[in-house]
Image (cartoon, helix red, strand yellow):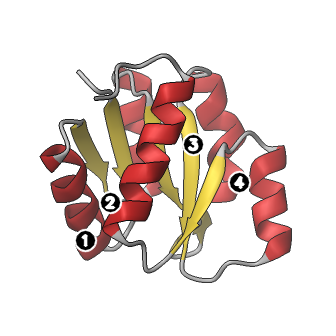
Amino acid sequence: MKGKILIADDEESIRETFRLILEGDGYEVETADSLSRCITRMQTESFDLLFLDVMFGVESGIDAIERLKILQPGCEIVVITGNPQVEALVKARSRGAFDYLAKPVRQPSLLYHAQKVLAGKGTVVH
């Protein structure tokens, strides 16, 4: 197994596109359409990698990073944003995010980040 990934984004098209790309490359993928569902999944299942949207309506994914890292310290977090701002990205990194991706995310970039993160964790990547 290449690794188990959670995609947390309030945009269905992002969740489904990421899921199809990552499953097609051999990853096990789950999705969450809200920050509360993301937290619930992290409380009940183990993940190797979380792609986390920066904003869920008025809720901040960045503000949840520390809590998510407490729930699963071994799960790496890559934030995804449609509006990359240096301050927010620095804040995300300082709270424990591994990296970030700017939307629109292209297939090669998504797969590269998944492989880079999971290879660093010792997860089998073919």
Q: In front here: 37 or 115? A: 115
Q: Is residue 121 left or right of residue 10?
A: right
Q: Kindly state the secondary structure of the residue where label 2 is placed.
A: loop
Eye-nearest disc, 1 or 4: 1
**Do residues under tags 3 and 2 come within 8 Å of each other at their CB atoms?**
no
**Do residues under tags 2 and 4 come within 8 Å of each other at their CB atoms?**
no
Q: In 3D space, how far apart are the residues under numbered discs 1 and 3 (Cα atoms)?
A: 19 Å
Q: Kindly state the secondary structure of the residue where label 1 is placed.
A: helix
Q: In 3D space, how far apart are the residues under numbered discs 2 and 4 (Cα atoms)?
A: 17 Å
Q: Which residue is mark 4?
A: 63
Question: Residue 23 at x, y = what percent?
Answer: 17, 45
Question: Residue 9 at x, y = what percent?
Answer: 40, 63
| Residue 52 vertical placement versus 89 (above, below) | above
Residue occupying the point 71% across, 38% down: 66
Q: In 3D space, how far apart are the residues under numbered discs 1 and 4 (Cα atoms)?
A: 22 Å
Q: Which residue is mark 2?
A: 33
Residue 39 showing in the rendered view: no
Quarter of the image where the C terminus is located: top left
Q: Which residue is mark 1?
A: 12
| Residue type for callout 2 | Asp
**Residues packed near mark 4 inside 10 Å, few (<14), some (14 to 19) or many (20 plus):** some
Mark number, residue 77: 3
Q: In front here: 67 or 93? A: 93
| Residue type for callout 1 | Glu
Earlier-in-chain disc, 2 versus 1: 1
Residue occupying the point 82% across, 57% down: 91
